[in-house]
Image (tube, rainbow, N blue to C red):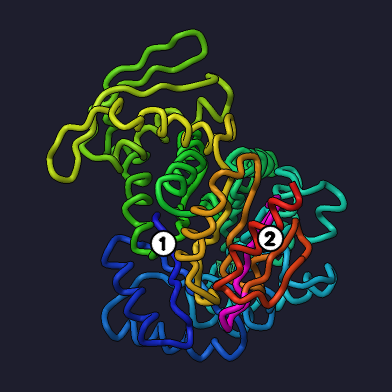
Amino acid sequence: MVQTMCNTHTDDIEATVAQTMRLAAAGAQIVRITCPGLQDVECMKEIRSRLRDKGCTVPLVADIHFSARTAIAVAPFVEKVRINPGNFHKDPQQAAMLLKELVSVCKEHGTAIRIGLNHGSLGEHITSMYGNTPEGMAQAAMHWINMCTSEGFHNIVVSLKASNTVTMTEAYRRLQAMMEESGEVYPLHVGVTEAGGGDSGRIKSCVGISTLLAEGIGDTIRVSLTEDPEAEIPVARYLSDRYSGTLRSSLRKVTTEGRRILAGYEAPSREKLLLDASCDFGRSLLLRQADDISFSGTYTAEDGRLVSLEDDGFAGYLSDELMQACRRRFYRPEYIACPGCGRTMYDLQDALREVMERTFHLKDTVIAVMGCIVNGPGEMADADWGYVGEGGGKVSIYKGKEPVLTHVPSEIAVDKLLELIEGGR
Ligand code: SF4
């Protein structure tokens, strides 16, 4: 099933209802809406009621961070509550007590819980034992699954997202194996988090998600793009159709030359070519079954022209992007960018575009562009530098996990980021 998330502010009820309806009409089968605090619970209730009045029955997920009380309060009014174990409560004992309370409300109202772990925000007690690793992610998920099942609650779905496709695929594989060993297998929601936008966001998402779907792992999917959420749906639908066997690749010929793949396409569009290539070869490159890839063939442009992949260096570009998404070769900086949501504090798409344009020469650097100061710093995982919206036209710049400049006016924030990176290299 295809899931996406609104990026409207939840207290803008009209805009959130309208966006949810557009997303459902475009093919979203589950829609997540951020619920930052107790003051938003009434908005969620109203959003759901207006949607149902308009005949829109798409299941709603309340997205919760840093407020277990909000999760408990909103649970009666949505189909699912997403909690992040890394920020549910700092104290493990308090977290267990609050989860018990949440489970009891969810049982009463038939609400599901998504245990939504992210690589960047695992919580100290997990990272101190396992590090910030796929093993840590899978162990943390098992711990939270066990806390739910010990209360007799099984209406659970789990996600273990990471921006790094190797970490993400490995974490899901480990959890799947652990669940199979335990004899209780729960559905998995799969996605590459903070994948960014444009070609690279699509390729990275397809590499991670298709690798797992090809292994039979994954029940619901989300393609997170730093774009309008409507743009996520065609990519997610492509993945869903392809792995349910109703859509075929435009790959026409494949040979090998040593450990290099030579792939020939006749694609009906540029976008389909990107998605086909990522799904056809992402997994082999990720698993190091091959070391490089070259493309040839054609795609049909929007104006009907047949474009040769050799034209304008497109074949080389596609190879570079796919190799980078699989973390096999880095030809440009690695960008981590959240998709944005109702917490976003600035124009995230513009910020990402400007940061990318100005830093593209800084190979071997990982730069995160995040929408909010509440969640962004915790979710940046292994970024070297972070560019985080504070609100009120201000930006914070992070080096690793530490803020090095705060309250920077957004007009000069990219200059400052550049000065810091170039000064520190
Ligand atoms: Fe929303 Fe981005 Fe903040 Fe996550 S980091 S809560 S996606 S604005």
Residue 89 appears at what percent x and percent y? Answer: 77, 73
Name the element at disc 2.
Answer: helix
Quarter of the displayed picture in which ligand 1 can be seen: bottom right
Residue highlighted by disc 1: 227
Residue 65 position in % (x across, y down): 65, 72
Q: Name the one closer to the observer, 330 or 77.
A: 330
- Assign a secondary structure to mark 1: loop
Residue closest to the far top: 258
Label 2 C-beta lies within 8 Å of the nearest ligand 1 atom: no
As shown in the figure, which amino acid type bears the numbered disc 2?
Thr
Tell me the number on the disc at residue 149: 2
**Magenta highlight range:** 378-394
Q: Is mark 1 within 8 Å of ligand 1?
A: no
Which quadrant is home to the N terminus?
bottom left
Q: Quadrant of residue 105?
A: bottom right
Question: 38 and 406: which one is in front?
Answer: 406
Q: Is residue 380 magenta?
A: yes
Residue nearer the viewer, 398 or 328: 398
